[in-house]
Amino acid sequence: MKHADTHSGVAAITKEELSDKIRKYDPVQIVNVLSPEYYNLGSIRDSKKIPLDQLDARISELDRNKEVVTYCASYDCSASRMAAKKLAGKGFKVRAYEGGIKEWKEAGFPTE
């Protein structure tokens, strides 16, 4: 069964939901899909860095048995939705965190 929201065809996750998953050690894979030139913005702690344009080539780095959460810079960035849509099409359970690293840092959640 696919989760969907109204505009992108993939479900979204809020910063609170994601923070809860991390705190409860839910087996979630968090993927930063930003290009390397944006790594200076920071990353959600313990997330994998797989730029959107490398996702197809590096998909084997992700475990199909665990939920994937994609994120990018902010609500203005569409990479998280594009990555989530791509992964959903390949059979992954995936949600997009659309607030991105900007919202995450503003909320005071842990980064690296």
Image (spheres, rainbow, N blue to C red):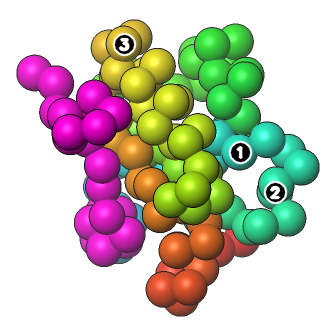
Instruction: Judge from the rendering whether residue 32 lies leftward or rightward of residue 5; answer left or right.
Output: right
Where does the N terminus fall, quadrant-wise?
top left
Magenta stretch: give its range. 1-21
* Residue in the picture at 64% in, 58% down: 73
The Cα–Cα distance between marks 2 and 1, rounded to whole angstroms, is 7 Å
Instruction: Judge from the rendering whether residue 60 lies leftward or rightward of residue 36; answer left or right.
Output: left
Q: Which label number is shown at residue 34? A: 1
Instruction: Judge from the rendering whether residue 111 lies leftward or rightward of residue 37; answer left or right.
Output: left
Which is nearer the N-term, disc 3 or disc 1? 1
Whether residue 38 is visible, yes or no, is: yes
Residue 21 position, x and y percent, is 30, 62
Q: Which residue is mark 2?
A: 39
Instruction: Judge from the rendering whether residue 18 lies leftward or rightward of residue 82; answer left or right.
Output: left
Residue 11 position, x and y percent, is 26, 41
19 within the magenta span: yes
At label 3, counting other C-alpha atoms closer than 10 Å, the crowd grade (few under 14, some 14-19, many 20 or more) is few
Which is nearer the N-term, disc 2 or disc 1? 1
Three-letter code, disc 1: Leu
Q: Which residue is mark 3?
A: 89
Disc 2 is placed on an element classified as: helix
At label 2, counting other C-alpha atoms closer than 10 Å, the crowd grade (few under 14, some 14-19, many 20 or more) is some
Disc 3 is placed on an element classified as: helix
